[in-house]
Image: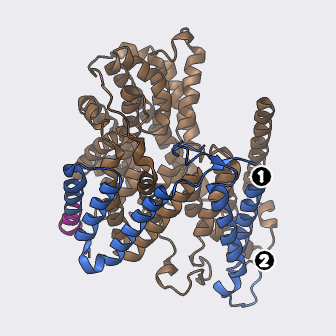
Chain colours: A blue, B brown
Amino acid sequence: MKPGIESSQENADRRVGVQTLITSGLLLVALAGLFTLTSQVTVFDFGDSGPDARFFPRLVLALLALTAGLRLWRHRHALETALGSARDWSRTLFAVVLIGVAIAAMNLVGFLASAAVVGILLSWLLGERRLSLSVVLPLVVAALVTLSARQLLNLPLP
Amino acid sequence: MLLDAFYALLDVWVLIAAVVGVIAGIVIGAIPGLGPTMAIALLIPVTFTMSPIPALILLLGVYQGAIFGGSISAILLNVPGTPSSAATALDGHAMARRGKAGEALRIALYASVFGNVFSCLVLMLLAQPLASLALDFGPAQMAALMLFALAIIVLFGGGSILDSALMTLVGIAAGIVGLDPIEGLPRFTFGSFAAEDGLQLIPVLIGLFAMSEVLLQAFGGHRQSRPPTKVGSVSGHVGILAMWRMRVTLLVSSLIGTFVGILPGIGSTVPAFVSYGFARSRSRHKETFGQGEPEGVAAPEAANNAVTGGALVPMLSLGIPGDAVTAVILGAFMLQGLTPGPFLFQHHGVEVYAIFEALILLSIPCVLFGLMMFKGAVHVIKLQPRHLFPAIAILAIFGAFSVNNSLFDVGVMLGAGVIGFLFRRCGFPLPPLLIGLILGPPLEESLRQALLTSGGSVDIFLDSPIALGLLGVTALCALGASLQRLRHRRQGN
């Protein structure tokens, strides 16, 4: 069990867990990078000897694929952290979508409103039910940040 | 130079920055779950409009204050505010249980200040000569030096070598996105102009260290609330004589902390435990260690604070960050136009020496406010992280936006937060990723420049004694780490 991860029934160690999934994802990204290298990095050949713009990405992506492959092989029999409950993932997804929507809507509704909504909903998501901490604190922080940015730092917040 | 630097410190804004930095650091360090890395990452945007000296003193004050602040909750609650305070909790909390919390806190404070001053003096002595030496380095030597630093982080950073290597390579790979450093050709930008600038360091590190923590809390960390704990009196007194009796422990622990701090990737937890072990081994009262021995508090505190100055030696003189905090501070230096590396002392000598002197002088507010804040800290450590994470999310969004006034950067921050969350769920270490991201572009530049100079031949690395020496040391370190692992495995069997 890795540190910082709650030891519950849902998070019990499993044969294929988050480590294998994430490492497999990294392996796929590295391989995709290697396959698309030619199309993503256009090189103009002026007859120079020595490495071109594709040299370093090729080296790093190959090493990344190799290391990810090696990790998958070395840990093929190891027990890993289970994915976790659907409820936990949905809470995290909600937090990501909430912040993503706030970023997308920031130009429309402004920084203050977006930040305040993010703060209040996150407070609620994290289990805070006291009005002073779940509503007032995020509102005060959002207002203070907006005011300081505009008046003290001269930042053009949306 | 030293006098000019001192005059530069005679500014009311420097004083305000030092005081605010130290107080903020102590408070943040005292709250378990928050740390100096996150605090500095979130504060960097606040320093954009400040001049370099107060801006960097503010951030370094947070760094110093937070390392000491971590010991407050370690002593009073047995919950280390920072990982490096775990060793302090062994005897510190035992002292608190015996009604000597005030004494333990004062020993921790004085030992922290001793370790900090000692390491800053070493920093002043070593950084400039090391930078002068590095001025003679060509691309081949610089590439070999960066390979050495990355290898040390992977081999001795703690945890699995394979996981550290994986994270370092992810960081280096992320640094590839954007324009190629030699020919200026776009790479993996997928046609986006915004991506041509590459991944901006500040949004990425805010995402990795602040937003990922918010997402971890959302995932399930909120269920880990600490039960309310009754904290006893924090009054007490520790005299000069009591500290003088620990002089050898303080000195050796500071030496260990400074030396380990200079080595990249090891951090401050290892020297804290090594110093604790050393103090115990040379003590006449070995049996009292773990039961409230004052030297058991002084040793780890002197060591983990000495790391702060030691870690700044390679960061300032060579541009190589030793751990996540110095990587974040490196980002702050770059934003202020002070690019760490061999030329820093030539181009910004006054600023750098002013920062060195300020680091030593920061000990004064650290002692003053440390003593004043013990009573207040009793309330601060009772704060649950969930009270603060919504505010941290707001500051993270603001911080990422303020770098370039761009919502693209806020998106990058959120993406880095999601990736950081997934890696932390796996238990993969984030500092190697950040250091890989920082060292990747200069490593590529040096490597390609060296190979272009030699017409593609690797002989350029073998013909230079410095490059060859560094590559040899890297190979020896790899061999040493492999043998050490093999021995541990045999002992385990």
Q: Nearer the viewer, residue B461 or B86?
A: B86
Crowd rating for badge 2 (residues with CA inside 10 Å; few <14, some 14–19, many 20+): some
The number of discs equals 2
**Residue B251 vertical placement versus B165 (above, below):** above
Residues shaded magenta: A145-154
User: What label sits on residue B455 in the rendered view?
Assistant: 2
User: In the image, are marks 1 and 2 on the same chain?
Assistant: no
Q: Is residue B342 visible?
A: no
Kindly report the secondary structure that dominates the magenta region of the rendered protein: helix
Q: Residue at x 24, y 77 (%)?
A: A109
Displayed quadrant of residue B430 = bottom right
Q: x, y (%) of residue B371?
A: 27, 28
Residue B137 shown left or right of residue B191 in the figure: right
Tell me which amino acid carries mark 1. Arg
Residue named by callout 1? A74
Image quarter of the C terminus of chain B? top right
Q: Residue at x 21, y 56 (%)?
A: A135
Which mark is in front, 1 or 2?
Answer: 1
Which type of secondary structure does the marked residue at label 2 adopt?
Answer: loop
Q: x, y (%) of residue A24?
A: 68, 64
**Residue A91 vertical placement versus B193 (above, below):** above
Q: Chain of mark 2?
A: B
Which type of secondary structure does the marked residue at label 1 adopt?
Answer: helix
Tell me which amino acid carries mark 2. Gly
As for residue B182 lying within the magenta part, the answer is no
Q: Residue at x 76, y 31 (%)?
A: B492
Q: x, y (%) of residue A94?
A: 41, 64
User: What label sits on residue B464 in the rendered view?
Assistant: none
Q: x, y (%) of residue A87?
A: 46, 57
Q: Nearer the viewer, residue A156 or A23?
A: A23
The residues bearing labels 1 and 2 have C-alpha atoms spaced at a distance of: 38 Å
